[in-house]
């Protein structure tokens, strides 16, 4: 008595069944953030003197040029080289995750974080006082909030999106945690 062969429960998916990889999207977002960050910093450094403040909306929003030796919001000002190594680790980590990336949401979030980390790394490597110790150029001042830049904004928005995606159960591959349905638009 012979039985007909059956497909295993974990049959591999056909390549057309899965959403496309989103590495190009992640890279495009990261490059855009780096370019915007670099251009805005060049403009601000050429336009403002260190510490100079230009009000935009009364005392609420202004451009204020500072050179930040620390992390976001001027934390860890004596640890510039450590912050550089942490940023490098973030970049390497995102590059490793990128191979599995099929979700638009994750590509957007990771692209923002990657672009922001690279934008600030450019300052750490190429601005004074020297390589791995360069001060990050910050120039946007909003109310009582610490002065920040485009890269900091991208990291913050990307981080919030990452938390939101995790809370919603979205995975890097475009699926939902605990669900059998694929959601390629996540």
Image: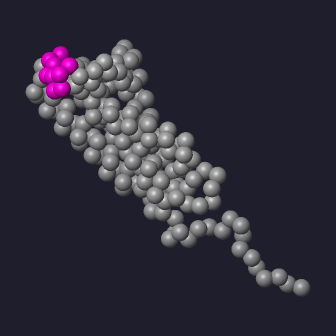
For the residue pair 21 and 93, the one nearer the viewer reads as 21
Tell me where residue 122 appears, x and y as whole percent: 28, 33
For the residue pair 167 and 32, the one nearer the viewer reads as 167
Residue 33, quarter of picture: top left
For the residue pair 110 and 130, the one nearer the viewer reads as 110
For the residue pair 170 and 129, the one nearer the viewer reads as 170
Tell me where residue 15 appears, x and y as whole percent: 52, 69
* Magenta highlight range: 50-59
Determine whether 161 is above or below 54 in the image.
Answer: below
Q: Quadrant of the N terminus?
A: bottom right
Left or right of residue 105, residue 58 in this image: left
Determine whether 71 is above or below 87 in the image.
Answer: above
Identify which residue is drawn at 36% across, 55% down.
24
Left or right of residue 46, residue 86 in this image: right
Residue 156, quarter of picture: top left
The magenta stretch spans residue 135: no
Residue 131, quarter of picture: top left
Q: Is residue 69 visible?
A: no
């Amino acid at each position: 008595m012979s039985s007909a062969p059956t497909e295993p429960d974990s049959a591999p998916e056909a390549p057309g069944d899965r959403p496309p990889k989103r590495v190009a999207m992640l890279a495009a977002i990261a490059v855009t953030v780096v370019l915007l960050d670099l251009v805005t910093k060049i403009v601000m450094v050429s336009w403002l003197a260190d510490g100079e403040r230009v009000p935009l909306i009364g005392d609420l929003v202004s451009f204020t040029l500072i050179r930040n030796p620390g992390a976001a919001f001027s934390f860890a000002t004596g640890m510039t080289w450590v912050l550089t190594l942490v940023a490098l680790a973030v970049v390497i980590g995102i590059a490793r995750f990128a191979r599995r990336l099929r979700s638009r949401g994750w590509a957007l979030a990771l692209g923002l974080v990657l672009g922001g980390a690279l934008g600030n790394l450019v300052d750490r490597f190429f601005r004074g006082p020297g390589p791995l110790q360069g001060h990050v150029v910050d120039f946007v001042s909003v109310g009582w909030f610490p002065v920040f830049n485009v890269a900091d904004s991208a990291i913050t928005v990307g981080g919030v999106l990452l938390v939101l995606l995790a809370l919603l159960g979205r995975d890097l591959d475009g699926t939902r945690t605990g669900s059998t349905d694929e959601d390629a638009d996540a």
